[in-house]
Image (tube, rainbow, N blue to C red):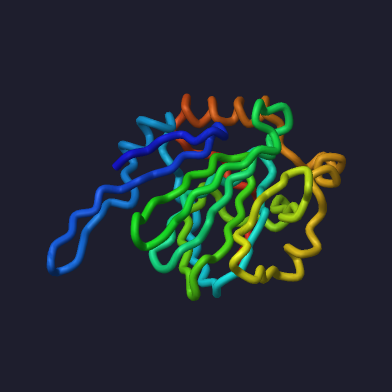
Amino acid sequence: MEVRELSVPGAFEVTPVQHGDDRGLFLEWFREDVFTEVVGHPLRLAQANVSVSSAGTLRGIHFAQVPPGQAKYVTCPRGAVLDYAVDLRVGSPTFGAHVTAVLDDVDRRALYLAEGLGHAFVALSDEATVSYMCSTPFSPGREHGISVFDPELALVWPDDVELVLSDRDRAAPSLAEVRDAGLLPSWDECEAFYRHLRDGDGRAPLPSHAGFGQ
């Protein structure tokens, strides 16, 4: 398994080694020891989600306030998606920048997004199944969205699919509006939170009044 940090700090691409024969194949899609060695702390598993999307479905940009935020470890066991990690940490050297990774059932890569990064993906195939492990449960009062069409972020979407968004995502505010509302995490508070995870056992405090989201 290879884990490498991308150009946005806190975004890591994970490439597993696949062992195949005439029966099929086997792979390790997560290894805590490898993850901890590279990232610097273990991944707390507090919630695991699965979404199934038709081609062109676009979900995001979603993020949670820090602390504790919500880190995500994302894979696509069936079909293919183009996954985006967006730096929303005010004061970060890469604030507003993004990285992408194709997650599919061929290379079977994963993308890890640290707390403070926004997440979005678009389905490239029909019935694309996305599975993601989360460091904290969904907490409605601390979960927010940003428009995927905000020109300040300049995200580029595939031009060969018709994009389909939920009403909530289509009506999401701009980056500037969310920043002016004081909802974005800062680089300094995220760095302090990462140090807390590295110095402790990797366990973030859970938010109160957690609930279920879609």
Where residue 90 sits, quadrant-wise, is: top right
Looking at the picture, does residue 95 appear above or below residue 126? above
Left or right: 79 in relation to 113? left
Q: Which of the pair 103/167 is nearer the observer?
A: 103
**Quadrant where the C terminus is found in the figure:** bottom right
Q: What residue do we see at 76% from left, 70% from top?
A: 167
Q: What residue do we see at 49% from left, 66% from top?
A: 50
Spot occupied by residue 202 in the image (x, y as percentages of width and height): 46, 35
Left or right: 195 in relation to 37? right
Looking at the picture, does residue 173 appear above or below residue 59? above
**Quadrant where the N terminus is found in the figure:** top left
Spot occupied by residue 184 in the image (x, y as percentages of width and height): 75, 40
Residue positioned most to the left: 22
Q: What residue do we see at 59% from left, 66% from top?
A: 160
Q: What residue do we see at 67% from left, 25% from top?
A: 188
Left or right: 6 in relation to 26? right
Q: Which of the pair 190/156 is nearer the observer?
A: 156
Left or right: 179 in relation to 72? right
Total marks placed: 0
Spot occupied by residue 101 in the image (x, y as percentages of width and height): 49, 49
Q: Which of the pair 159/4 is nearer the observer?
A: 159
